[in-house]
C-alpha cells in the first residue's frame, strides 16, 4: 500500500468522526496514523450481560474484516488478530470461512474470563507480549480496536459518518434487546425499547463492572455508550456505585486487614506491573504518600473493578480509592512510566471465570439473551454532545433554525487540536445550541 493510500484511510476515518467505541473514545484517525506490526480486534466483550459485539460480528463479518484490513493497511501491520471468546460460536462461524485464504489474519480464541477485554490483557492473552506499566499498546507495536470501531472504519471508506450506536439494553427489563439508535437519542427512550419496568430501579451506563450510574435519563447516547442496564435500586452493584469516596476511605481505614487479595488478583499486577492496590490502600490509610513510584503506579490501574467486586473480602473499594488518586495526579499533570516485573507464574489461573463473577455480582437472574434488532430506531429528537471523545470538544457549525440532513457535518475539530467530528444523526431542524450540545428535531425540508 502506498503512503498516499495509507493517508487516505486515516483521512476518511477522520472525516467520518470515528472514535474508539469500546472505551474513552480516542480518535481513531490518530491511532491509524501510527506504524504498527499487529492490529488486534478486541472482540472479547467481557463485561457480564453485554451482547453487542458478538452479535455484530455474526451479522456483519465482512464489514469487520474490511475494517481490520484497512487498519492493517493504514498502520503497515503485517498481521491481524481477532481476539474472540471461544464461547461466541456464531461469531466465530461467521468469520472462519472468510479468513481461510488470508495468511495474515488469525482468530485467537480466548477463555471466558474477566477482564479479557482490557486491551493490555487482550494483548497478553493473544500474543503473550506485555504492555509496560503506564505504556500503550503501540509501545510494543500493537494497535487494538473494538468491533464497532472497525465496522465504522469500513463504513467511512464510502463516506458514511458515525451517526448510530449499537448497544445492549438489559437487566430488569421485560425484553432485553440489542438495538441500533441514532447518536443523541435519550437514554430513557432507549430503555423503553427494552420495555423497562416501573419498579424502584436504577440504571448503569456501560457494563456492570466498569459502567457508571446514570443520574439523568434525559442524557443522550454517545459514540461510546456501551450498554444500558436496569437493576433494582437495592441491588449491591447500585448500592456500591452510590457510596461516597468519604465512606470508602473510612471503611478502608477501619477494616483493611492487608490480606493483599486485591493485589494477588489484580490483572495488571499479575502480568508484572508494579501496581499493588493493597499497598496503595495502606499508603492512603497512613498518609504515607512518600513513595512516588508506588503512588504514581496507580495511573496504570485499568479500573476493571476486580479488587472491589471480587477480591476484597471486607467490602473495600481499592478501585474507587485509585480513581480518586488518579484524578488528583492527572490534575497535577503527573505521568507514570514503569518497568515490567516478573509475570506471576499462576497469572492465567488468577483471572476470573465470568460465570463465577456473574454469581458474585448477583446478576444471574438477568443473565439473558438480548437479541440484535435489525431496525434502526427513529427518535423525533436527538441531542448530540460536542464532546464525545478524548481531546477538545468540537466547534458547532450550525445555528438554531438551520435545517440539516442525515450525516451532515455539524461539529468540527478545533484547529490544531485532537478531537473528532460530529455529524447530524437525524434529518431535521436545529432547535437548541448550547456550549456542550446541539439538539435536532425532526421536521423541516433538508437542503
Ligand atoms: S481496578 Fe483494581 S484490580 Fe483492576 S487494575 Fe485497578 S487495582 Fe487492579
Ligand atoms: S483485599 Fe481488601 S482487606 Fe485485603 S488488602 Fe485489599 S483492600 Fe485490604
Image (cartoon, rainbow, N blue to C red):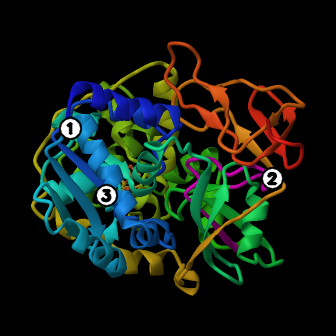
| Residue 201 % position (x, y) | 76, 71
In the image, is residue 222 part of the stretch drawn in magenta? yes
The picture quadrant where one finds residue 340 is: top left
The residue that label 2 is drawn on is 218
**Secondary-structure class at tag 3:** helix
Q: Quadrant of the C terminus?
A: top right
Viewer-proximal residue among 276 and 304: 304
Q: Looking at the image, is 199 positioned above or below residue 339?
A: below
The residue that label 1 is drawn on is 132
Q: Nearer the viewer, mark 3 or mark 1?
A: 3
Query: Disc 3 and disc 1: Cα gap in Å?
Result: 29 Å
Q: Nearer the viewer, mark 2 or mark 3?
A: 3
Viewer-proximal residue among 3 and 263: 3
The disc placed on residue 62 is: none
On the question of residue 357 being in view, the answer is yes
Task: Kindly report the secondary structure that dominates the magenta region of the rendered protein.
Answer: loop
Whether the residue carrying mark 3 lies under 8 Å from ligand 1 is answered with no
Viewer-proximal residue among 257 and 155: 155
Q: Looking at the image, is 63 positioned above or below residue 138?
A: below
Query: Disc 2 and disc 3: Cα gap in Å?
Result: 36 Å
On the question of residue 121 being in view, the answer is no
Q: Looking at the image, is 185 positioned above or below residue 428?
A: below
* Mark toward the start of the polypeptide (2 vs 1): 1
* Mark toward the start of the polypeptide (2 vs 3): 3
The residue that label 3 is drawn on is 65
Q: Residue at x 43, y 54 (%)?
A: 151
> Is mark 2 in CB contact (under 8 Å) with mark 3?
no
Q: Residue at x 77, y 26 (%)?
A: 398
* Mark toward the start of the polypeptide (3 vs 1): 3
Amino acid at each position: 500500500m502506498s503512503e498516499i493510500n495509507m493517508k487516505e484511510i486515516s483521512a476518511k476515518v477522520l472525516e467520518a468522526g470515528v472514535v474508539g467505541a469500546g472505551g474513552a473514545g480516542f480518535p481513531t484517525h490518530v491511532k491509524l496514523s501510527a506504524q504498527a506490526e499487529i492490529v488486534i480486534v478486541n472482540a472479547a466483550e467481557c463485561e457480564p450481560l453485554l451482547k453487542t459485539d458478538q452479535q455484530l460480528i455474526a451479522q456483519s463479518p465482512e464489514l469487520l474484516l474490511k475494517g481490520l484490513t484497512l487498519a492493517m493497511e493504514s498502520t503497515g501491520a503485517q498481521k491481524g488478530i481477532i481476539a474472540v471468546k471461544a464461547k461466541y460460536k456464531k461469531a466465530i462461524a461467521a468469520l472462519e470461512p472468510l479468513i481461510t485464504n488470508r495468511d495474515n489474519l488469525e482468530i485467537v480464541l480466548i477463555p471466558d474470563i474477566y477482564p479479557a477485554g482490557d486491551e493490555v490483557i487482550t494483548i497478553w492473552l493473544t500474543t503473550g507480549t506485555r504492555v509496560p506499566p503506564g505504556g500503550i499498546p503501540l509501545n510494543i507495536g500493537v494497535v487494538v480496536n473494538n468491533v464497532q470501531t472497525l465496522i465504522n472504519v469500513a463504513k467511512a471508506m464510502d463516506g458514511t459518518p458515525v451517526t448510530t450506536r449499537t448497544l445492549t439494553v438489559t437487566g430488569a427489563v421485560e425484553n432485553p434487546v440489542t438495538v441500533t439508535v441514532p447518536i443523541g437519542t435519550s437514554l430513557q427512550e432507549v430503555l423503553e425499547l427494552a420495555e423497562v419496568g416501573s419498579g424502584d430501579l436504577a440504571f448503569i451506563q456501560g457494563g456492570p463492572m466498569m459502567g457508571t450510574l446514570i443520574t439523568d435519563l434525559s442524557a443522550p447516547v454517545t459514540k461510546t455508550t456501551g450498554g444500558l442496564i436496569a437493576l433494582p435500586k437495592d441491588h449491591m452493584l447500585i448500592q456500591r456505585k452510590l457510596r461516597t469516596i468519604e465512606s470508602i476511605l473510612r471503611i478502608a481505614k477501619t477494616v483493611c486487614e492487608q490480606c493483599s487479595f486485591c493485589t494477588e488478583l489484580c490483572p495488571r499486577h499479575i502480568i508484572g506491573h508494579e501496581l499493588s492496590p493493597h499497598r496503595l490502600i495502606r499508603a492512603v490509610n497512613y498518609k504515607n504518600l512518600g513513595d512516588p513510584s508506588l503512588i504514581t503506579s496507580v495511573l496504570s490501574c485499568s479500573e476493571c473493578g476486580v479488587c472491589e467486586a471480587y477480591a476484597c473480602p471486607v467490602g473495600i473499594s481499592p478501585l474507587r480509592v485509585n480513581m480518586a488518586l488518579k484524578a488528583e495526579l492527572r490534575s497535577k499533570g503527573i505521568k507514570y512510566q514503569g518497568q515490567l516485573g516478573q509475570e506471576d507464574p499462576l497469572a492465567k489461573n488468577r483471572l476470573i471465570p465470568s460465570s463465577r463473577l456473574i454469581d458474585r455480582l448477583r446478576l444471574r437472574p438477568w443473565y439473558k439473551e438480548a437479541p440484535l434488532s435489525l431496525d434502526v430506531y427513529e427518535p423525533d429528537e436527538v441531542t448530540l454532545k460536542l464532546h464525545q471523545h478524548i481531546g477538545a470538544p468540537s466547534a458547532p457549525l450550525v445555528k438554531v433554525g438551520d435545517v440539516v440532513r442525515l450525516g451532515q457535518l455539524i461539529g468540527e475539530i478545533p484547529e490544531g487540536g485532537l478531537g473528532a467530528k460530529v455529524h447530524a444523526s437525524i434529518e431535521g431542524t436545529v432547535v437548541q445550541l448550547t456550549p456542550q450540545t446541539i439538539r435536532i428535531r425532526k421536521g423541516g425540508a433538508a437542503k
